[in-house]
Amino acid sequence: MTGTQKNARKKFSLVFTVALICLMAAAITPCVMGASTVSLGTAGNYVILAKSGITTTGTTMITGNIGVSPIAAGAITGFGLIKDSSNQFSTSSLVVGRVYAADYASPTPAVLTTAVSDMETAYTDAAGRAGPDATELYAGNLGGRTLAPGLYKWSTGVLIPASTALTLDAKGNGDAVWIFQVSGDLTMSSASQVVLINGAKAENIYWQIGGGTGVTLEAGAHAEGTILAAKAITMKSGASLHGRALAQTAVTLIANTITAPTPAPAQTAVPTTVQTVATTPAQTAATTTAQTAAPTTTTAPTGAASTTKTVNVGGNSGVYQAKVTGTGNTGLTVTGTTASGPGQGIPQPSGTVYQYLDLAPAHYTTIDQAVISFTVPVSWLDDHNIAPQNVVLQHLDGTMWDSLPTTLVQTVGGQVYFTAVSSGFGRFAITGQYTSAATTVQTIVSTVAQTAQPTSQPTSLPTTKSPVPVWVPVTAVIGALLIMAVLSGRSGKNS
């Protein structure tokens, strides 16, 4: 009997200790691993979803479905909607996907009601996450910063200043999640960008914005992730988003590019019309062809498919983006560095030179064309009495300068934004002409930069803290071992 009691106590001690350790690990592990994803539900089936309207001017390019509810289709303006014969959705030359509204035929209204509800639930979820890794970080100024995965909270607004980058570093963890809780507004100034490195993914980034104005992406800015806004989302000329714009009021666009992140969302509670959105190469090609703003892709002589890739250009030049159409451009990175002159034995280009620069990719690809986006300060133009429409990007072809088709996009914050079309890379010169020598082309908007590099070195690399201090799991394990020792000691005495 005594031996049986002794064995029973030992078994109880062992089982109790193992169970305690497992319970502590189960409670602590999710916190130590960092933030978890925010479920978008059926709202994830839309790249833009708004309650009071979606408006665009200029040539916008959207890849994914868009929808409005409870407002009717009349609140979707600038898209030239063509209603499908089913009356359940519309199409647009600006949308590689389908357009839905609350006044379309069943089941669209009910599906949209669910999607909007899921959008609001996702917003509440993101806003309610507790235990932030950092609060009021850098007083909300994130220009030039690098952030590790985690939960970040601000009681005011967040700003990414002009021509700076916020870099999100996943440190090799493809499942890393960022949640930004912002009580104020989110403002990305002109030519600013969010850059993803070391495995960071747009589908794992969530911006919960509660400000009275909402979200503003100024000209040429590039954002990554899902934007959950209590108010409006406004994108200025040339701004782009690799993610989703989910607004509880309106979304306003001006010649923008918005592309849904991958992987594709689950198709739960979505009508069959949504499940077939632009999934075939033929559909994508047809829509792209209809958009005159998008460069025509061609097939290389080798038979490989020509694709278009946009990167945010690093370096110290006036070029900030390059949209490359060609083959073999997967993982493309491009750097622009200033040069002191045209080069030995090379004549000066015509006009007044603002900047010589070398634009080169990390590896060379078959290039059909490159759309190059660059800026020139208003002050330089004023000092040299040059009108913005007379700025031309010139490309060195052998020993001759070739004036490229150059387009004036917009003037914002003391900078004038341009795009130019080139057949390749190499040495360039940004020049101002005194005569109307610039050949204009239709404004071409850059697409999202999935492999963008930061334009400047981060000034700080904050390390996120775990919501649970390190001493908690250590203490738990030590405590469990002590309990096991005490129970084992009692078993020995009783035996």
Image (spheres, helix red, strand yellow):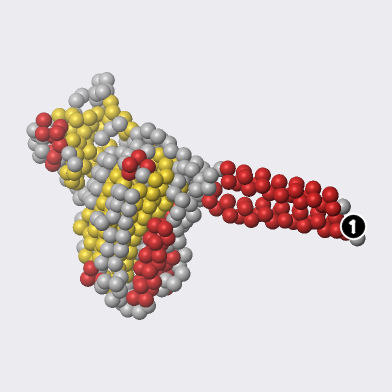
Is 306 placed left or right of 159 in the picture?
A: right
Q: Residue at coordinates 15% horizontally, 32% vertically from top-left?
A: 380
Which residue corresponds to mark 1?
Answer: 2
Q: Residue at coordinates 19% horizontally, 46% vertically from top-left?
A: 409
Q: Residue at coordinates 30% horizontally, 52% vertically from top-left?
A: 184
Height in image: 297 above or below 272?
above
Q: Which residue in the rendered view is the most extreme toward the front?
A: 493
Q: Which residue in the rendered view is the most extreme toward the top?
A: 344
Q: Position of residue 237 (x, y in %)?
A: 22, 50
Amino acid type of the residue that numbered disc 1 sits on in the rendered structure:
Thr
Height in image: 91 above or below 159?
below
Is 236 placed left or right of 381 in the picture?
A: right
Identify which residue, 27 or 355, lies in the foreground: 27
Quarter-of-image position of residue 122: bottom left
Quarter-of-image position of residue 119: bottom left
Q: Position of residue 103 (x, y in %)?
A: 28, 76
- Can residue 239 be seen from the camera position used here? no
Q: Position of residue 334 (x, y in %)?
A: 36, 37
Please, what secondary structure does the residue beneath circle 1 have?
Answer: helix
